[in-house]
Amino acid sequence: MASEKFPTPVADLCDANASLILAGELRILEPVFQPYGQCRSFSGRVVTMRVLEHNAGLRALLETPGEGRVLVLDGGGSKRCALIGGTLAEVARGSGWAGAVVNGCVRDVDDVNGCAIGVRALASNPRKPGKSGATEMHVDVDVGGAVVRDGEWLYADSDGIIVCDREIYG
């Protein structure tokens, strides 16, 4: 169900799946993320990546066919540099990624906002990231106060961001 605008708003998905929230299978991320990019609503299967103040390996990942997936990039919440900018947002869009949730910062905000992709990040920072460091792929990450696992489903719109271990409907 990866799409720029999924048919059911996040609030309605929460209402229709309240039992999954109570069971801990549907998790709501804290409202700390700012919207970037042209797509205010996006959803897709999650791919996780963990870095700290560098984006080594990120371009290679975003150059793979996105197939409507959503990158959840855990930068440890650091606001000391950006992890994604306009160039990588365009690479992701061109490869068919639906969006990205960045537990860190973006830069080149005007370029990212001009890109037909959905991005959520903590803030913007003009400083570029390092290009080397430890990168962990397909691992559980703690983002926005919730554990997000590779392969789960993420839904984002103006009301917030939710993740679930399965595709859900309203």
Image: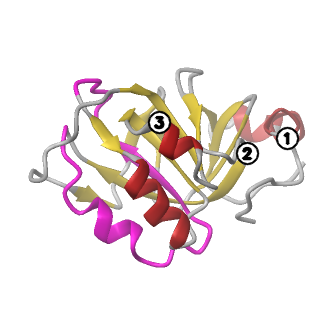
Calculate the distance from the C-alpha at mark 1 to the C-alpha at mark 3.
25 Å
Say what secondary structure mark 3 lies in.
helix
For marks 3 and 2 on the same chain, the one whose residue lies earlier in the sequence: 2
Residue 121 visible = yes
Which residue reaches farthest left?
132
86 lies left or right of 49: right
For disc 1, the neighbor class at 10 Å (few under 14, some 14 to 19, many from 20) is some
The residue pinned by badge 3 equals 109
User: Does 93 appear above or below 30?
Assistant: below
For marks 1 and 3 on the same chain, the one whose residue lies earlier in the sequence: 1
The amino acid marked with disc number 1 is: Pro
The residue pinned by badge 1 equals 9
* Percent coordinates x, y for residue 102 in the rendering: 43, 40
User: Does 27 appear above or below 31?
Assistant: below
Q: Residue at x 75, y 66 (%)?
A: 1
The amino acid marked with disc number 3 is: Val
Q: Which mark is residue 41?
A: 2
Q: Residue at x 73, y 45 (%)?
A: 41
Residue 26 visible = no
Calculate the distance from the C-alpha at mark 3 to the C-alpha at mark 2.
18 Å
Would you say the magenta stretch is mainly helix, strand or loop? Answer: loop
* Percent coordinates x, y for residue 92 in the rendering: 48, 63
Q: Which mark is residue 46?
A: none
Q: Residue at x 82, y 54 (%)?
A: 6
28 lies left or right of 72: right
User: Does 5 appear above or below 128?
Assistant: below
- The coloring applied to the image is secondary structure
For disc 2, the neighbor class at 10 Å (few under 14, some 14 to 19, many from 20) is many
